[in-house]
């Protein structure tokens, strides 16, 4: 059925007496939410709503969809128990089943704003149910996922919190399928943008990247990995190197050492200066694990047989970066401290 035919069909359904009675029933149930005072009342509300939606599942138009989406998002409040979250996800499933792929594609933003934050704070027994819902209803949307791709990726990243947990592999596989659906270049572009904008998700994003990427042995292999996203990647790394979290800084340096070695000259001069000016500031933390990775990257050490050497490519960028720092009067001592830490 094309979109025009579906629109005509929906308009005809809305005009039927049966659908109008369905609307009145849903409206009555939604009005009871204001009287909810404890979590048991929320379960009762969701049970009534799911029954009403299930009994009229033949309708592919959900009445009062904005208010339903709002109430469901409220039912996913972190303060509520996992049983409420599970019941809420059941209602989402009923809705997605009713409206189908085209309906969900049209109303993706309406329902996603309640679902996307859930993985970060949900209980262990809720996470697989949520991931299954994504796999069953979101992945079939294909290219229609592109408008919400950055948000969807950020919604999945908390699944990489602990490599030993039972849903880590499920999240990893879901991310891989998502990458294949929208294309690697667009997927990694959104991932790097997410790292820049969301500080809380950076460590999870690097966990996925460092597991996903294979170490390049040539410049061509390196370019194939980043799929034209070197510029946005340089901004992503620079932002992460200035992060307050030591683990994020360590992961960003690991990405540079393993996948963007200076021997391949991965960045243009402008992009390199952005990375180097952030990278050399990590010496001020006086952390051995950070310094070891920083010097490995600056000196082009990619394996045990590598001969440490400060190339003209890096040397020129360090000089440019220090000169720019000297022009900032508010932090005039900073470049001197960096130079002392780097070369003393």
Image (cartoon, helix red, strand yellow):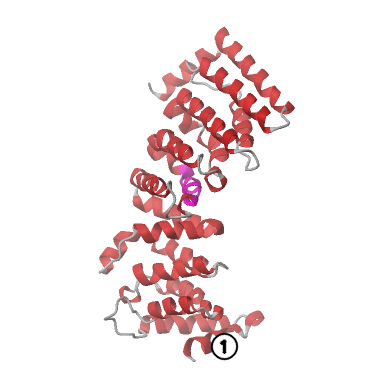
Along the line of sight, the residue nearer the viewer: 8 or 113: 113
**Residue 317, position in %: x, y?**
44, 80
Q: In this view, does 93 lie above or below 17?
A: below
**Residue 160, position in %: x, y?**
45, 53
Q: Is residue 44 left or right of residue 217?
A: right
Q: Is residue 272 left or right of residue 338?
A: left
Q: Is residue 95 left or right of residue 73?
A: left
Q: Give the residue furthest to the bottom.
A: 344
Q: In this view, does 229 lie above or below 165?
A: below
Query: Dot 1: what SS?
Result: helix
Q: In this view, does 2 lie above or below 150?
A: above
Along the line of sight, the residue nearer the viewer: 291 or 242: 291
Please tell me in which quadrant of the rendered image residue 25 appears. top right
Q: Which residue is drawn at 44% across and 50% down?
A: 165
For the question of whether residue 161 can be seen, the reply is yes
Q: Which residue is drawn at 54% across and 34% down?
A: 86
**Residue 230, position in %: x, y?**
39, 63
Q: Residues within 10 Å of mark 1 (few under 14, many from 20)?
A: some
343 in the magenta segment: no
Q: Residue at x 47, y 90 (%)?
A: 343
| Magenta: main secondary structure | helix
Please tell me in which quadrant of the rendered image residue 68 appears. top right
**Residue 298, position in %: x, y?**
40, 80
For the question of whether residue 228 can be seen, the reply is no
- Residues in magenta, as a range: 147-158
Task: Identify residue for label 1.
Answer: 336
């Amino acid at each position: 059925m094309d979109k025009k035919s579906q629109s005509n069909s929906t308009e005809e359904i809305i005009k039927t007496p049966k659908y109008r009675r369905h609307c009145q029933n849903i409206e009555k149930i939604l009005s009871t939410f204001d009287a909810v005072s404890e979590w048991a009342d929320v379960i009762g509300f969701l049970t009534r709503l799911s029954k009403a939606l299930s009994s009229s599942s033949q309708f592919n138009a959900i009445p009062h969809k904005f208010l339903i989406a709002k109430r469901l998002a409220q039912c996913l409040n972190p303060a509520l128990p996992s049983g409420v979250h599970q019941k809420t996800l059941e209602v989402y499933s009923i809705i997605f089943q009713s409206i189908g792929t085209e309906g969900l594609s049209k109303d993706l933003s309406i329902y996603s704003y309640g679902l996307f934050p859930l993985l970060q704070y949900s209980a262990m027994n809720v996470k697989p149910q949520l991931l299954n819902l994504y796999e069953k209803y979101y992945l079939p949307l294909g290219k229609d996922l592109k408008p919400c791709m950055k948000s969807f990726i950020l919604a999945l990243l908390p699944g990489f919190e602990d490599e030993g947990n039972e849903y880590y592999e499920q999240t990893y596989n879901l991310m891989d399928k998502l990458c294949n659906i929208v294309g690697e270049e667009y997927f990694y572009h959104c991932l790097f943008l997410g790292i820049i904008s969301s500080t809380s998700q950076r460590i999870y994003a690097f966990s996925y990247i460092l597991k996903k990427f294979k170490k390049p042995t040539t410049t061509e292999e390196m370019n194939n990995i980043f799929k034209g996203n070197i510029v946005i990647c340089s901004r992503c790394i620079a932002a992460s190197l200035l992060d307050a979290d030591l683990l994020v800084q360590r992961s960003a340096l690991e990405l540079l050492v393993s996948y963007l070695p200076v021997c391949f000259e991965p960045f243009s001069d402008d992009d390199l200066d952005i990375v180097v000016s952030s990278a050399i500031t990590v010496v001020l933390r006086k952390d051995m694990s950070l310094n070891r990775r920083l010097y490995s990257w600056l000196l082009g050490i990619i394996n045990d047989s590598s001969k440490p050497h400060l190339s003209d490519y890096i040397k020129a960028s360090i000089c440019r970066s220090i000169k720019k720092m000297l022009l900032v009067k508010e932090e005039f001592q900073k470049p001197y401290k960096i130079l002392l830490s780097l070369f003393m």
